[in-house]
Each structure stands twice: as C-alpha cells, then as structure tokens.
Amino acid sequence: MKRSTGSTAASLRCDSCGQLPEPGKVRLTLANVAVMLPIELAVHAVVVQTHLSYPLKVLLLALTATALVIWVAEPSVMRFLRTWLHAPALKQRGRLDAAADLWRARVRVDDTPGALERISHQLARRGVNIMSLHIHPGSGSSVDEFVLAAPTGIGEQDLVRAPLLGGGASAQVWPSTALALADGQTKALSLACHVAQDPSELPYAVAELLSADPVVPPSPAVRSFVEGAELLKIPSPAGEPMVFSRAGEPFTAAESARAHRLSELAAMAAHCGALHGRGD
C-alpha cells in the first residue's frame, strides 16, 4: 500500500483539484493579523500626514487599507506562511508516512490448540504486528480476520506466506486503512439503528456491514448460505430475496447470521410501522 510522501505544503494538494486543505482558523487568523497590522499602521501613518479633511482621510484610509489587504496581505499570507499554516496537517502526514503499512488478511485456521499461536509467531518473525483479530467460527475450523501493521518492505506475498507456514490455509490479503480498526460492534449497532428507523435501509446496511455489493436483479437460484460461496441471499421485509456478492472473499456462517438478524430487524420494524399506521 503506497502513501504519498513529502514534507512541504505542496505535498498536501488534492490530486483531483490541486487545492490545499483549509488551514486551521486560529493559525489563519494569527497569520492575517501578523501581515495586516503592519500594513494598517503604515497606511494610517501616511494618510494622517496629508492635509485632507477628516472624512476624506477616513475614506482614503478605508479604501487603501482594504485594497492592500485583499491584493497584498491575503496572497502574501497564503504564499509565505503556507508551511506554518499547514504545519498540523504536515505533521500528521509525517506520522502516516512513518507508520507501518496496514493490511487486512483472512486465514482459515484449524480449531486446534496452538493453531493461532503458530500463525502469530510466523507474522512476528517478519515484524508484523496484529492490530485486531476477529474470528468467524465454522465447522472444525474458523476464518480469522486480521488487521496487520507490516514494516516497509513486507509485501502481499510475504503476508500470504507467513500464515501458510504457520499451518493456516486459504490465506488472502488486501491493502487496508485505519478505518479497518474501527470498532466492529459499534458499527453493527449503528447500522441496526438505521434499519430499525427505516427498514428500506436494509440493503445498504447489509452491504456496508459485510463490505459486499447488492446483486440487482437478485437470482432466485442462489441459496441462503453455502460455506465458501461468494453469494449470500437474505429475505427482505417485503418477502422478496436480496442477494449480495463479494468477489474473492467468501461469506462466513457468522456473516450470514448477522445479515439475517438485520433482515429480521427490518421485518419487525416494518411490521410495527404498519400496525402504527393502522392505529392512526
């Protein structure tokens, strides 16, 4: 997984529009004051020395100071103080550049004592740190989902080989981001709340929960759940099937159960809504 590098403000420019991020309000205010104050004082000193009437002095002072601020001060702030204005973002970029690469991995692990320890040992030998672990139980084995922090130089093939040497099987690895470290339980509860409030959100909630894509139109030939399948079918509140796909990453029994629980919640919410509507 590659990150953009650079220690100057130019490295923060958006690849699409070329714009820099908005600097912090406090830093922008301090920079504007630092540039505008000398200009205001200089203009005031010059205008005061003229022999114009007081109203004309005020008008000239206002117009001159405003023009200098718009055409000189603000561009100067953004040009000469750019690095200072974006220092927090540059610091954060530096921390990200120095951090280990994040990967998401799935490995089938035998349901025997020490199986996970052997895989962890192989990862540790390569300097790979396990940031999070989620286990999808199965029959005689489980699918263990890792978020891994790997040092520079450790690539996808190394991360696939390590679990296999540790006794794992069917290892799959994908580049990831810090979003993978978000609390899964909190995410699931949030999606459940959305479905309870609006049952029509069910397909979007399931797609987000399982990182899958809805299949439209759904195929009636798809079974509800088959171990190792890349298609998953659940009922909708209306009774029609919903099918989801995830290429290269088969669904687990635990994921099927979660999707079906969301479907049941949507059906209950729709039923309660219908009863409430008739009561009104």
Image (cartoon, rainbow, N blue to C red):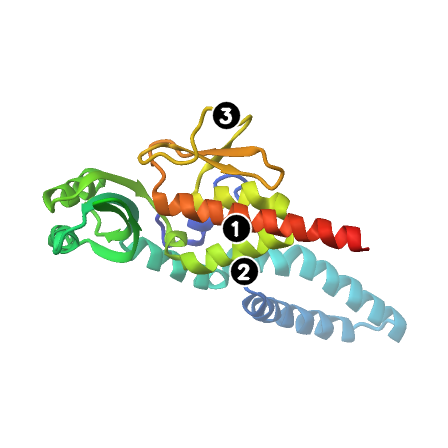
Image coordinates of residue 226 in percent, x first then y, are: 35, 34
- Left or right: 230, with 55 as reference point: left
Q: Point out the tag, 3 or 2, that comes first from the N-terminus.
A: 2
Image coordinates of residue 34 in percent, x first then y, are: 58, 71
Q: Residue at x 35, y 58 (%)?
A: 94
Question: Quick check: 153 above or below 88?
Answer: above
Q: Residue at x 74, y 55 (%)?
A: 276
Whole-number angstrom distance, CA of label 3 to CA of label 2 = 53 Å
From the image, tell me which residue sits under label 2: 23
Q: Point out the tag, 1 or 3, that comes first from the N-terminus.
A: 1
Can see residue 4? no
Q: Using the image as rendered, state which of residue 201 and residue 183 is in the foreground.
A: 201
Q: The disc labelled 1 sits on which kind of residue?
A: Leu
From the image, tell me which residue sits under label 1: 20
Instruction: For label 1, count other residues whose C-alpha is less than 10 Å away and answer few (under 14), some (14-19) or many (20+).
Output: some
- Left or right: 42, with 141 as reference point: right
Whole-number angstrom distance, CA of label 1 to CA of label 2 = 8 Å
**Which of labels 1 and 3 is toward the front?**
3
Q: The disc labelled 2 sits on which kind of residue?
A: Pro
Labels 1 & 2 near each other (Cβ < 8 A) = yes
Q: Using the image as rendered, state which of residue 5 and residue 233 is in the foreground.
A: 233
Q: The disc labelled 3 sits on which kind of residue?
A: Pro
Labels 1 & 3 near each other (Cβ < 8 A) = no
Can see residue 172? yes
From the image, tell me which residue sits under label 3: 220
- Left or right: 189, with 164 as reference point: right
Image coordinates of residue 40 in percent, x first then y, are: 68, 71
Q: Residue at x 19, y 38 (%)?
A: 157
Image coordinates of residue 25 in percent, x first then y, are: 59, 66
Instruction: For label 2, count other residues whose C-alpha is less than 10 Å away and answer few (under 14), some (14-19) or many (20+).
Output: some
Task: Identify the secondary structure beneath mark 3.
Answer: loop
